[in-house]
Amino acid sequence: MNSLDKQETAALGLALLGSIYIAYKVVGPSSTTPSAIYTLRGPESPSWLSGNNEAARTPFPSNTTFESWMREYGTTFPLHGFFGSKELFIADTQAIAFVLNQPLDFPKTRMVLNMSRNFMGDGLVVAEGAEHKRQRKILNPAFGVAAMRDITPMLMEVAHELRDVWKKSLSGSNSGPPWQEIDVLPWLSNTALDMIGLAGFGYKFESLHDSSNELGSAFRAFSTGISLIKGMGMLTMFFPSLRRLPIGSNVVNNRSREVMDRVGDQMVKDKKAEVEQLGESSSSEGRDLLGVLIRANLKEHAADRLDDKTLRAGELECAVRVACDHSNASYMEEISTFLLAGHETTAIAMTWGLDALAKNPGVQSKLRDEALAFPNDSPSMEDLNAMPYLNNVVKEILRLRTPLIGIRRTARSDTIVPLAQPIVDKNGKKVHEIFLRAGDSVLLHTYALNTRQDLWGSDALSFRPERYEELSDGVSDIPSMWGNVTSFSAGPRGCIGWRMAVLEIKALLFTLLREFQFDIDPKLVITGVVTTVPKPQ
């Protein structure tokens, strides 16, 4: 072997050793350690196609499937998903907090991202890492305490409109009984839309009086597609390119976008002109959320400020979806993302809330007494927050009838997740932490956590607001944005709009309970199919 051959051999040997070292560093010494998805006990899969999903989608809230599984396997166990896939079900407080507080290490799953992009584009819901932090920083003023204080009168105004419409309907039936049967979900959906329009953009949909509003119709059609994913919408979660096909829900979504783009463009121009005319610091007008954001933009350094060329209406997927070049601060696109996500969820939470109050007349009467004790029908944000029983009722609604059933995340790299409660693996060994491989999917189950009997008591499935007067120590360990429930998620990616959602529900309950008594036919069974949200039917 000549010297050149020796040099080449040495170089090859060094390259090989380097490759082995790099592989060792990337894969790690635990490369043979199996994922908890394969070492823990869990339910069998009845179907390669749908896995355990059918059992999980049985009518809500009567679904006790997860409760029975937790009794058998503990608060952490593997589930079978679509097409033979597997994911880890988690209802352990420490494990959920660990995942939610490390969004960089546990990004959203590809399926969730595909769905979010399909309906909301590349906004706050989809952004990751530094981009998410930047967008959230820009958005924070629009959802802070001061902004919520300003929009409270607008929310109360819409709540009063719903009250007056129902009163007029009842007074018009003098010849009949002093009651009327009402399907509350459509009414509450229109109410939530009107609240979003007025408080978010200073725009009146007038949905409670006229359902023919072009923008309102487009918004309802689009938001319905989010609350009930099926058919083509389900397929695009796995194959996002299918949303380009002019069939099924794609056609409805595209038509809705065209209307929202056109109307939203003019709406933003009008609001921008209004704010600029009044001045950056004006507090007398433009106090809707869009006005807050535009004023925040005017206060930015000139180099960072969005100009008229950058600000454009596009990819409108809400009453107003304002998209900006993604190289710039696209904060006004993000507010519409929140509003779109919050429209149906608020209406659905309120519907479940009235259902619970109708079935628990003692709770309803106690809440009505508190509301009637207030001297007028227009409380401020501070007044609503100072009503203890109203606070507890809203917490109980969001705990027991959470619009957010579960949160899916993916492990970016191999990691060890701590557990608050040890579990037993397939070999009968008690484990206090679980090992996840890069790419493993986890399902943080909000509803299961919100109804764990060891945390909430043996009556965890019962509607009892009084439980918040004396909570167990374990409840304080639940990761939460508000109310010791994970209904708004938690951590750096927790729901930025939780204050507005809570305020909307409080405004409606306060107003409606002062005027009406709600009852329900005991023979009527209301269930909800769990898709993106548990919609009553």
Image (tube, grey):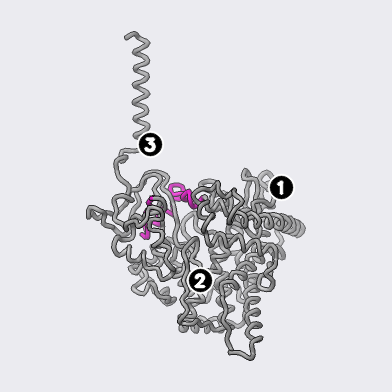
Name the residue rendered at 55%, 46% in the picture: 241
Q: Is residue 93 left or right of residue 299?
A: left
Q: Which residue is mark 1?
A: 307
Tell me which segment is drawn in magenta.
Answer: 84-113
Label 3 with label 1: CB-CB less than 8 Å: no
Q: Of the residues tagged 1 and 2, which is closer to the observer?
A: 2
What x and y, as percent, mark residue 111? 48, 51
Q: Is residue 107 magenta?
A: yes
**For residue 26, which numbered disc appears in the image?**
3
Q: Residue furthest left?
A: 428
Binning the other alpha carbons within 10 Å of mark 1 as few (below 14), some (14 to 19) or many (20 upward) gives few
Name the residue rendered at 59%, 78% in the picture: 511
Per the image, label 2 sits on a secondary structure element best described as loop
Q: Amino acid at mark 3?
A: Val
Binning the other alpha carbons within 10 Å of mark 3 as few (below 14), some (14 to 19) or many (20 upward) gives few
Rounded to the nearest whole Å, what is the CA distance between mark 3 and mark 1?
A: 44 Å
